[in-house]
Amino acid sequence: MKNRSILKTGRVLLMALLVMTCLSTWALAEASKPAAKKAKAKKPVPPAIASVLEPKAMDILKACASRLAAAKSMSFTAVVSYESPSRLGPPLIYTTEGEILMQRPDKLRVITQGDGPVGEFYYNGKTMTGFAPAENLVAVAEAPPTIDDMVVAAYDKAAIYFPFATVIAADPFKVFSEGLTQAFYIGPSKVIGGTATDMVCVVNDVVFQQIWIGAEDKLPRMARAVFHGDPAGLRHQIEFSNWQIDPDIPEGAFASEKAAAAMPITFDRPDIDKYRRLPAGVKPPGRKAKPAEPKQGGAS
């Protein structure tokens, strides 16, 4: 009984470590919200804004998507920051940092650290592996033959969500442009990553997003999003750096000897169902989210 209890605890811990965005902290925040809320006064709904896709904004998105899609392999650093409600009202912010290595069409390695223990994820076209080095626990499952399908399977099987999934997709522009109702050019910037970027804003029924894209290399540098379905309007941000396009990849880069020797546990979602929940309005990978219910005060 004691061993089963240890394995059960380890399984929950490992899969919680592998959730790549605010799943776990969101669940904790939900539990910390005050039990009762005062009803807010209704606000008038603003008039609808006509759909406009500015050619300049779309050209910048297409150039970025083409650069990403043409890469046979890539590596980059992704720093993800997301807000989560606090008991006092103003949101707290949590941050993770991921070192990502990808090779098309069927290889991915993600080493994640940040506000919590280190987690490692490996995909080799046949299996996906989650490894918690500190606990020496490993979970392995069969996987689909492409990165796009693996991203969906990882979420379905274990609530693993990759916030950078768009940039490693086979067709990034399809993801960028899906359901767009607004796209416009904001202007130039030289602040993010110490490089010249073009700022664009894109809006669909799910999210309002501002994206900084390298003016010269056409690579994404930062994205900041607010999901329409989130009544708190919490902000989610991902910053990209250390880009390498088509780098030399050493043999064995998509596996871990330490993981292979670790104590195996089931590749499964955490037992605590709240860990599986995405924040309100966030779109699970590979699916169309339901449009947000019209809310008082407008979408964004």
Image (tube, helix red, strand yellow):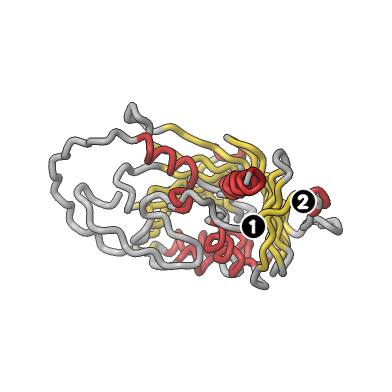
Relative to 291, residue 112 above or below: above
Comes first in the chain, label 1 or label 2? 2
Q: Residue at x 39, y 62 (%)?
A: 54
User: Number of labelled discs?
Assistant: 2
Residue located at (54% from left, 60% from top): 155
Q: Is residue 79 above or below residue 151?
A: above
Where 97 falls versus 220 (above or below)?
above
Q: Circle 1 is placed at which residue position?
A: 266
Task: Find residue 86 and name its label.
Answer: none
Frontmost residue, 21 versus 184: 21
Q: Amino acid at mark 1?
A: Thr
103 left or right, relative to 54: right
Q: Residues within 10 Å of mark 1 (few under 14, many from 20)?
A: some
**Picture coordinates of residue 220, whole percent (x, y):** 57, 52
- Read off the residue under disc 2: 259
Question: How far from the left and from the top, in percent, is residue 158?
Answer: 56, 57
Q: Secondary structure at mark 2?
A: helix
Left or right: 243 as drawn, with respect to 55: right
Q: Position of residue 231 (x, y in %)?
A: 29, 46
Q: Quadrant of residue 40?
A: top left
SS class, disc 1: loop
Measure how far apart labels 1 and 2 are at the Cα level.
14 Å
Q: Residue at x 69, y 45 (%)?
A: 132
**Is residue 14 visible in this depiction of the protein?**
no
Looking at the picture, which amino acid does disc 2 mark?
Answer: Ala
Q: Which numbered mark, 1 or 2, is in the foreground of this view?
A: 1
